[in-house]
Image (spheres, rainbow, N blue to C red):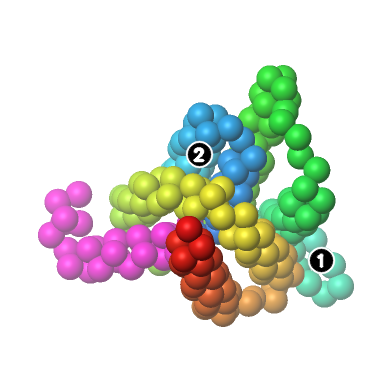
């Protein structure tokens, strides 16, 4: 352990891997923010805490069973000359879930047919929100940990990077969730991001890799445009008042 603390290579690996884990965690934060936006504020905070805690637990558990995880990349069966492993199947399933969930949420937003739920339905919404967060946490954790295995050699460095990234995700998830809840147009944009991410996951599962740089550039550019729109609307309200 002391050798790692005094090794420049170990610190460089930790910083690089932490940065990558944070970038990969953006998808998770967006998804959780969209999910909790339908829950009352008190429950939303609990759901966010539970979701990110589960994300941390899943990542550490997966890191602790590296041999099994590496075996997930071995082909299980072939579909039209494409060898699919359990990792590929999970990515395809997770991507399809994201696309379906985002499409359903977009439909609900456009229809705008939501009334005030009663106590029982609130509990049901909270339960299903946690279930959805668990499913997507598992998908994103798998992708994140396979990246960690490829980047670092020491389990301690991997776990430290994952813990740091999850802490940063937790700190940033609150402001992101509040911003999404306060600005309905940003929620629609976030849902579009989820469709984009879902397509990328399905493509990865079928061995067609879409460089993440393109996706993150599109997300960053769209978010910047939306931020200017939010500022413009705020300025118009101030002038009107």
Task: Decide whether residue 11 is among the magenta residues.
Answer: yes
Residue in the image at 80% along x and 43% along y: 113
Of residues 153 and 113, the one drawn nearer to the viewer in this rendering:
113
Task: Decide whether residue 13 is among the magenta residues.
Answer: yes
Specify the segment rendered in magenta. Answer: 1-25
Residue 82 visible in the current orientation = yes
Q: Badge 1 is on which residue? A: 78
Work out how far the residue at label 1 is from the one at label 2, CA to CA, in angstroms: 38 Å
Residue 201 visible in the current orientation = no
Q: Position of residue 74 (x, y in %)?
A: 66, 61
Question: Does 169 sit left or right of 74 as displayed?
Answer: left
Of residues 191 and 186, the one drawn nearer to the viewer in this rendering:
186
Number of other residues with Cα within 10 Å of mark 2, as a class: few under 14, some 14 to 19, many 20 or more: many
Q: Quadrant of residue 238?
A: bottom left
Identify the secondary structure beneath mark 1: strand
Q: Badge 2 is on which residue? A: 48
Of residues 25 and 82, the one drawn nearer to the viewer in this rendering:
25
Q: Position of residue 157 (x, y in %)?
A: 31, 55
């Amino acid at each position: 352990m002391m050798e790692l603390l005094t090794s420049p290579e170990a610190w460089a690996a930790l910083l690089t891997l932490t940065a990558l884990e944070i970038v990969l965690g953006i998808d998770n934060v967006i998804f959780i923010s969209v999910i909790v936006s339908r829950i009352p504020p008190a429950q939303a905070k609990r759901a966010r805490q539970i979701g990110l805690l589960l994300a941390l637990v899943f990542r550490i558990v997966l890191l602790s069973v590296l041999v099994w995880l590496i075996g997930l990349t071995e082909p299980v069966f072939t579909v039209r000359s494409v060898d699919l492993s359990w990792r590929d199947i999970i990515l395809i399933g997770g991507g399809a879930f994201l696309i379906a969930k985002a499409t359903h949420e977009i439909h609900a937003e456009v229809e705008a047919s939501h009334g005030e739920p009663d106590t029982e339905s609130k509990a049901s919404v909270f339960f299903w929100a946690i279930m959805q967060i668990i499913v997507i946490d598992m998908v994103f954790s798998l992708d994140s940990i396979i990246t960690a295995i490829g980047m670092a050699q020491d389990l301690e460095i991997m776990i430290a990077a994952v813990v740091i990234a999850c802490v940063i995700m937790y700190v940033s998830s609150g402001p992101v969730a509040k911003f999404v809840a306060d600005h309905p147009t940003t929620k629609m944009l976030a849902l579009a991001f989820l469709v984009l991410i879902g397509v990328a996951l399905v493509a990865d599962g079928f061995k067609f890799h879409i460089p993440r740089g393109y996706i993150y550039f599109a997300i960053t550019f769209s978010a910047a445009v939306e931020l200017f729109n939010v500022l413009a609307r705020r300025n118009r309200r101030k002038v009107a008042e």
